[in-house]
């Protein structure tokens, strides 16, 4: 694959304009764009194969089921799960984490006095479900700090000594991000899983930001759960993945009742379907699920390309330089040796909302605010930051537009 | 005292000289700078209208003439610029007139996008708060 021109041609939306200016889409950490192979399959399924899956014996249902299950197998292959049965399809990473949290609590795996270990830089979706569990069960959060901030170390690393120490304090579950949506730095998840397992504690990895930028092998990682959303890796919104190790699939009680998750239903006693269907109540978003296949096949091709790696490396260097060229700009985890193409930053004397508003008028799409990670953004960014996040389809020319626009915006707001 | 609609019409007229969005925003930024700040002492939790991304403080007092007088501030300057327009429109009006107001100027000057909840600038919340205050005094 030729980068970035050839891959860019796969994304029709990247040609659009915002108010007569070319779109510079730097909000990929929120939602990535969809390549033609995904858009075409969506269209094809809606116009030729729409039916409810897993139930009826008619042709359309049979075809739809086939596409959906092919999506599941594509996930298995992409993250190297031992079996497709270990892949539960959900509405997104948020639902996946809620499912695990709720089922662990209901199954009695987390109880009164137990600790749930998170890092300080989690997304709300990996904080709030656990807080709900805490409220129900009388368990509590153990929060491990990360090295980020204006004073002291700023490489985004998790305090591993604190992590290991916390494991000895009655922790029954570890739930950590693969890559923080604020810091853009990969956590040493393999090491963390090994440490947790050494203490007999299961681990959930929130892969929402990691999945599009790092190859994941759940067997090599040995994590108990790995979750991600389709829309951050070229697939449509409304579909997500919960990888759960086979043993957990059987141990956990069902999450929601109804639809296809049952074996036999009577008013006296209902039995449940085998996993993963046991966790898939109600009618699935079969179109989005089916689209995981082209999306992940596309992602694999992109991620395995040496040309892509070189291109992304150039994007990261150019962005580092662009951000350094703005006076008074501070980048979270700027000392990280390696990062994914994601930067959260503040600019002295400029409110992030003002900057993002003006940047949008110039055609540059950024995120601003607490970005669903209030605890860390409150501590390091005063409650609000700007974020730029790129994908391999972004270009050096776009980085240059970003730089010029940012300088102009800062000048307007500071004068 | 100009009526709410008279003030809206003059704001629309002022903005009509700007063809470019850039000039409109420059003007808003200037308005934001000019807005007489609420006193630091007014920036209390109780006066805070929590938008998701910018903070807006609103203080209201009713004078013996039965009219409502507003002071406001925000930590974001574009938000502050738009607030200054709202304060200009509502300052010194009666609760009944505030409740009956149709804020057509926002659309007319092309700032509607700043009022959507996703913009999270706290403006929609600010308008709601002004109406709530007017309702309280209207009943009283």
Image (spheres, coloured by chain):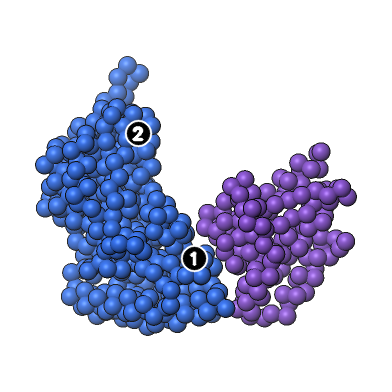
Chain label for disc 1: A
Determine the residue positioned at 27% across, 36% down: A115
Left or right: where B140 falls relative to A89: right
Front residue of A177 and A150: A150
Q: Answer whether residue A213 is visible to the viewer in this image.
A: yes
Quadrant location of the C terminus of chain B? top right
Q: Which chain is purple?
A: B
Question: Would you say residue A83 is visible in this rendering?
Answer: no
Circle 2 chain: A
**Can you give x and y, in whole percent of width and height, for residue A387 in the image?**
40, 65
* Location of residue B126 in the rendering, given as x and y in whole percent from the top left corner: 65, 53
Q: Tag 1, which secondary structure?
A: helix
The chain letter of the blue chain reads: A
| Residue labelled with disc 1 | A352
Query: Which residue appears at 68% of the width and 49% of the height?
Result: B129
Q: Nearer the viewer, residue B55 or A223?
A: B55
Q: At which x and y percent is residue B110?
A: 66, 69
Toward which corner of the image does residue B57 lie, by quadrant? bottom right
Residue A3 in picture, x, y percent from top left: 27, 79
Residue that mark 2 sits on = A134
User: Label 1 to label 2, Cα distance in Å?
Assistant: 33 Å
Q: Residue at x 33, y 28 (%)?
A: A137
Category of crowding for the residue at label 1, using alpha-carbon neighbours closer than 10 angstroms: few (below 14), some (14–19), many (at least 20): many
Q: Is residue B39 above or below residue A361?
A: above
Left or right: A21 as drawn, with respect to A29: right
């Amino acid at each position: 694959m030729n980068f970035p021109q050839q891959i860019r041609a796969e994304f029709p939306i990247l040609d659009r304009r915002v108010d007569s200016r070319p779109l510079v889409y730097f909000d990929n950490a929120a939602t990535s764009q969809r390549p033609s192979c995904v858009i075409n399959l969506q269209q094809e399924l809606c116009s030729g194969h729409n039916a409810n899956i897993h139930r009826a014996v008619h042709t359309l249902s049979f075809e739809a089921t086939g596409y959906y299950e092919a999506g599941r197998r594509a996930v298995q292959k992409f993250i190297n799960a031992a079996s497709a049965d270990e892949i539960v399809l959900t509405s997104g990473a948020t639902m996946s984490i809620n499912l695990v949290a709720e089922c662990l609590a209901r199954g009695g795996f987390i109880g009164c006095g137990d600790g749930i270990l998170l890092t300080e830089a989690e997304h709300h979706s990996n904080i709030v479900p656990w807080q709900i569990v805490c409220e129900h069960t009388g368990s509590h959060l153990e929060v491990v700090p990360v090295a980020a901030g204006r004073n002291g170390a700023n490489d985004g690393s998790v305090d591993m000594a604190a992590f290991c120490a916390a494991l000895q304090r009655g922790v029954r579950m570890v739930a950590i991000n693969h890559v923080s949506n604020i810091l853009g730095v990969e956590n040493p998840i393999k090491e963390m899983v090994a440490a947790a397992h050494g203490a007999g504690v299961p681990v959930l990895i929130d892969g929402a930001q990691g999945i599009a930028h790092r190859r994941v092998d759940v067997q090599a990682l040995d994590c108990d759960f790995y979750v991600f959303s389709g829309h951050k890796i070229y697939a449509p919104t409304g579909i997500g993945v919960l990888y759960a190790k086979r043993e957990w699939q059987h141990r956990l009680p069902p999450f929601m009742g109804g639809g296809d998750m049952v074996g036999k239903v009577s008013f006296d006693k209902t039995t449940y379907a085998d996993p993963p269907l046991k966790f898939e109540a109600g009618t699935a978003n079969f179109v989005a699920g089916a689209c995981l296949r082209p999306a992940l096949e596309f992602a694999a091709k992109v991620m395995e390309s040496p040309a892509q790696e070189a291109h992304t490396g150039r994007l990261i260097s150019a962005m580092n330089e662009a951000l350094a060229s703005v006076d008074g700009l501070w980048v979270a985890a700027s000392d990280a040796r390696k990062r994914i193409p994601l930067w959260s930053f503040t600019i002295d004397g400029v409110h992030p909302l003002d900057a993002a508003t003006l940047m949008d008028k110039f055609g540059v799409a950024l995120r601003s605010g607490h970005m669903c990670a209030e605890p860390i953004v409150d501590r390091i960014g005063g409650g609000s930051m700007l974020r730029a996040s790129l994908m391999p389809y972004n270009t050096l020319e776009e980085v240059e537009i970003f730089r010029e626009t940012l300088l102009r915006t800062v000048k307007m707001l500071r004068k | 005292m100009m009526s709410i609609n008279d003030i809206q019409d003059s704001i629309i007229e002022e903005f009509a000289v700007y063809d470019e969005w850039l000039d409109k925003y420059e003007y808003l930024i200037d308005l934001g700078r000019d807005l007489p700040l609420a006193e630091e002492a007014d920036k209390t939790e109780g006066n805070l209208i929590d938008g998701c991304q910018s903070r807006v403080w609103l203080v209201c007092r009713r004078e013996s003439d039965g009219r409502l007088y507003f002071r406001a501030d925000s930590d974001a300057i574009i938000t502050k610029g738009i607030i200054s327009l709202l304060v200009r429109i509502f300052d010194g009006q009666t609760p009944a007139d505030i409740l009956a107001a149709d804020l057509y100027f926002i659309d007319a000057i092309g700032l509607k996008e700043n009022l959507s909840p996703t913009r999270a600038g706290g403006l929609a919340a600010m308008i709601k708060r002004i109406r709530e205050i007017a309702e309280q005094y209207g009943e009283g």
